[in-house]
Amino acid sequence: MSFILSNINLDSPDGFTFIFIFLIAIPFVLIFPLITRLVRHLRIKRQIKSRTIINMYESPSKLSPAEIGYLYDTKISKNELVGTLFNLEDRKIISISSSGKLKQINDSIRLSEFEEYICSLVRRGTLTSINEKLDSTIYQTFSSMVRESLVSSEYMQDNLLSGFISSSLKIALRIYIVSVVTFIAYWFITAYYFHALDFALGEYGKISILVILMFIIISATYFILYIIAGAILTLIFVKINGTIWIGTKKLKKIWNDIEGYKIYIRQAQLDRLKFENNEIKKASNEKDFAYAVALGMNINWKNRFK
């Protein structure tokens, strides 16, 4: 790399091309989505401190702890199930004793399918304690029901593979468009930059359209590379941002609210929730506590039942 850089001649079009395309344009295209995410996070944190975001104090669109937890990694673990139990307790549907024993105390409230499934386990005695180790089939059934709820509510695509492919193609198209626009900008900047080096701008302009069209056609033949890059970036974004990148339009509209609510809990509520869980053995705000558990935040909820 050092050899290449040492042999770049900025007084030639080729050297100018290398600097402009490879050291400026391409890195910008790759890191731009990460920059926008960082800016969004900083904006949300600033709004939390100024207490200007009211909807952060409520779960977005009344999504349950299990549903929001599932949206981040499309998996159901003990966290989402326990978060659901705490949420049901907060709504006075079940009770949880100081030892962690479960009991349904209200069966007149309409529940979602996956919440009713958990209550049925409690009624039948299959799930008797919050500390109980459950069979994997229970998690599979619960996960399937949570997923079906999100699909029926149009927050998640039924086929995640098609969503992944769609997202990869969209990113590939954006990269392709940016590369074309970048090349066009480069071409005319080079024409202006090297005009003093006896570049006949008039003659240069005559072949500009032909060269640009050739670049568009040639780069289109390598579109498969853009698709591969799009797939890699989609995987990175899903890892960082959750499934927003392969979700539905309805999910994308509320994702900032979901992110905001998560940051609100972590920044404004987590220390208090941890203290109350460990010392008082009861959270003053069970609703936020249930979401914090479902989102896998650093709360050892088992300490409440020791």
Image (cartoon, rainbow, N blue to C red):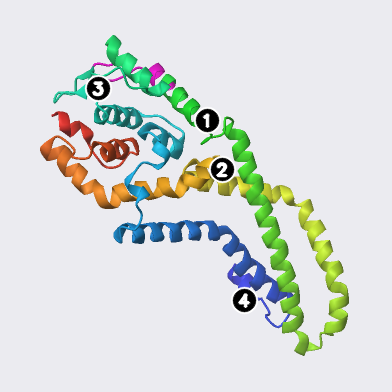
Estimate the spatial distance between the alpha carbons at disc 1 and disc 2, rounded to whole Å: 12 Å
Q: Residue furthest front?
A: 108
Q: Which residue is mark 4?
A: 6
Tell me which label, 2 or 3, sits earlier in the chain: 3
Estimate the spatial distance between the alpha carbons at disc 4 and disc 2, rounded to whole Å: 48 Å
The residue at 81%/85% (across/down) is 199
Amino acid residing under circle 3: Ile
Estimate the spatial distance between the alpha carbons at disc 4 and disc 3, rounded to whole Å: 71 Å
Q: Which residue is mark 2?
A: 249
Assign the C terminus to one quadrant of the image: top left
Report helix, strand or loop for mark 4.
Answer: helix
> As rendered, which of 169 and 262 lies closer to the eye?
262
Q: Residue furthest top?
A: 124
Estimate the spatial distance between the alpha carbons at disc 2 and disc 3, rounded to whole Å: 35 Å
The residue at 15%/28% (across/down) is 305
Name the image quarter holding residue 276. top left
Residue 151, numbered label: 1
Amino acid residing under circle 4: Ser
Amino acid residing under circle 1: Val
Tell me which label, 4 or 1, sits earlier in the chain: 4
